[in-house]
Every structure is written in structure tokens, then in C-alpha cells.
Amino acid sequence: MQLQENMSAVVTGGASGLGLATVEKLLAKGVQVVIADLNDKGEEVAKQLGAGAHFVKADVCEPEQMKAVIDKAVSLAPLRALVHCAGYGAPIRVVEKDGEPGNLEKFESIIRVNVIGTFNSLRLAAAAMAKNEPLDGERGACVLTASVAAYEGQIGQIPYSSAKAGIVGMTLVAARDLAQRQIRVNTIAPGLFDTPLLSKLPEHVKSALGASVPHPARLGFPSEYASLAVQMLENAMLNGETIRLDGAIRMTPR
């Protein structure tokens, strides 16, 4: 399915980082893009990107808010693409350093945003795509975002690793489920990327993180994530797959 005009796409977490880079790539293809984000700066980002970009403030876990995002996209053109980048993590240990058990409320929150938010976005987007007329044998395609932490979670990452592993586990099942509707599902598992979260770190810390990547020995560029996302959307044979985008890094326990 070649991305082109007369199509719409939804990018969650599209106001910054990996999501923003993906929005820019989709706009370059002529696609109408709806940015779904809790960040209020999304409105200004959409204005700066031009007429093809639209912003709807939304929590990916909330059905009505995400339905408004999907409805906006469908009002612009048939919804053919979802790139789900929204998510977050926070450090929790099974038993904290002070001997107290890990925070269950925080654990549940991270699982909710990453796993429930992913499924909520996927189910609503797929239901809209299923109503499309097939184009090149497809009705739509979805790209989800996991992490290398799904495979090598570090100490303190137990909720984030669990959540991202859930997204990896979701991928093949969703692809099989939606095959009859001619909708593909793939996932990207990024390694260390130069995102707003990492940009807050001191430069020497960022350099050290980049040097830990075998090759290329640097942080990934958001544009590299976006390029793979577009390839996943356009390559009809790529389905049910999770691809690590990590420069061959394997995370250490700490």
C-alpha cells in the first residue's frame, strides 16, 4: 500500500520525538495526519507543520477521546494508517531499596498507558479501517511501539519491560486476527533514541549512552524510527513482525 494523498493517518504521541518524526514523514507523502497527544503543544506543532496536520488532544486509554481522534481522521480521508508511539515508563523495583514492596499503583498506571492504550488505539483504528475499500489488496496498516526493554529489561524497569513485552505479544495475534480484514500489524522495538526524554540528560551522559551501542555508536535519530514505520506501512509482505531498531545493543542488567 503506497502512502499518498486521499488517505489519513493517526499518530499517537505525535507532538514530539519518534511520533513527530513519523508525522513529518507521512506529511511528505501527502497523507492527512491527525496527531493524538496529551501534550498541549500539539496544537502549535500541527500549525507549524501545515494544512495536512491536525491535532486532537487525547488520552490513548480513554475510548471516547480516541474515538474522537479516529472520527477526525475519517472525516479528512479514509483512515489507512496508525502509528502508535504514545507510552511512558518509571522506575520500580520488586522490592525497593528501603525494603518496601514495589508501588502497585504506579505499576498499574504504566501497564495501563502502554498496554491498554495500545490496544484501545489499535481496536478503534482497525474498526475504522475495516470499512475501507481495499487498495492494492489492503484496507490499512498499523505500527505499534515496543522497546528493547521487552527483551532485556534492566533492574527497575519491571513495569515498562512487562508492558512492552505485552505489545510484542500483541503483534502477531493482532496481525492474524485482522488478516481476514486485510489489515496488517507490525511493531518497532527501539533501542536508545535521541528523544525529548533523553534530551534532558547532560551531554556527557548522552554521549556515554550512545557509545554503548555497538554500531552505529550513537543514539538513534527519530527520523530512523520514522523511516522504518513508513516502510512497515508500505511493504505489504511485512506483517505480524516485531523489528528491533537498536544498533545491535543488548541491554545490561543495570
Image (spheres, rainbow, N blue to C red):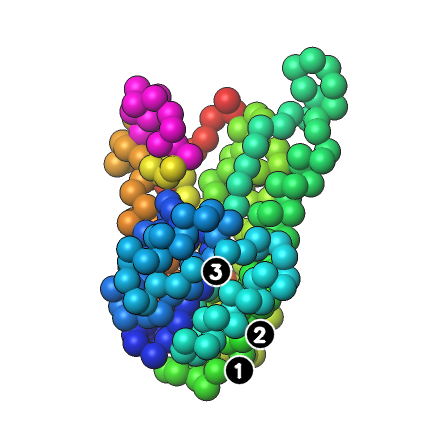
Of helix, strand and loop, which one carries label 3? strand
Characterize the local packing of mark 3: few (<14), some (14-19) or many (20 or more) Cα atoms within 10 angstroms.
many
Q: Quadrant of residue 219?
A: top left
Q: Which residue is mark 1?
A: 131
Discs 1, 2 touching: Cβ within 8 Å: yes
Q: Which residue is mark 2?
A: 127
- Can residue 203 be found in the magenta stretch? yes
Q: Which residue is mark 3?
A: 56
Q: Main secondary structure of the magenta part?
A: helix
Q: Please state the extent of the stretch shown in magenta in the rendering.
A: 197-210
| Mark 2 residue type | Ala
Quadrant location of the N terminus?
A: bottom left
Q: Is residue 10 above or below residue 140?
A: above
Characterize the local packing of mark 1: few (<14), some (14-19) or many (20 or more) Cα atoms within 10 angstroms.
few
CA distance for labels 1 and 3:
22 Å
Q: Quadrant of residue 103?
A: top right
Mark 1 or 3, which is nearer the eye? Answer: 3
Of helix, strand and loop, which one carries label 2? helix
CA distance for labels 3 and 2:
19 Å
Left or right of residue 57: residue 213: left
- Can residue 153 be found in the magenta stretch? no
Of helix, strand and loop, which one carries label 1? loop
Q: Is residue 167 visible?
A: yes
Q: Position of residue 133 (x, y in %)?
A: 46, 86
Q: Position of residue 151 (x, y in %)?
A: 52, 40
Q: Is residue 183 visible?
A: no
Residue at position x 53%, y 28% from top?
Answer: 154
Q: Earlier in the sequence, mark 1 or mark 3?
A: 3
Left or right of residue 90: residue 190: left
Q: Earlier in the sequence, mark 3 or mark 2?
A: 3
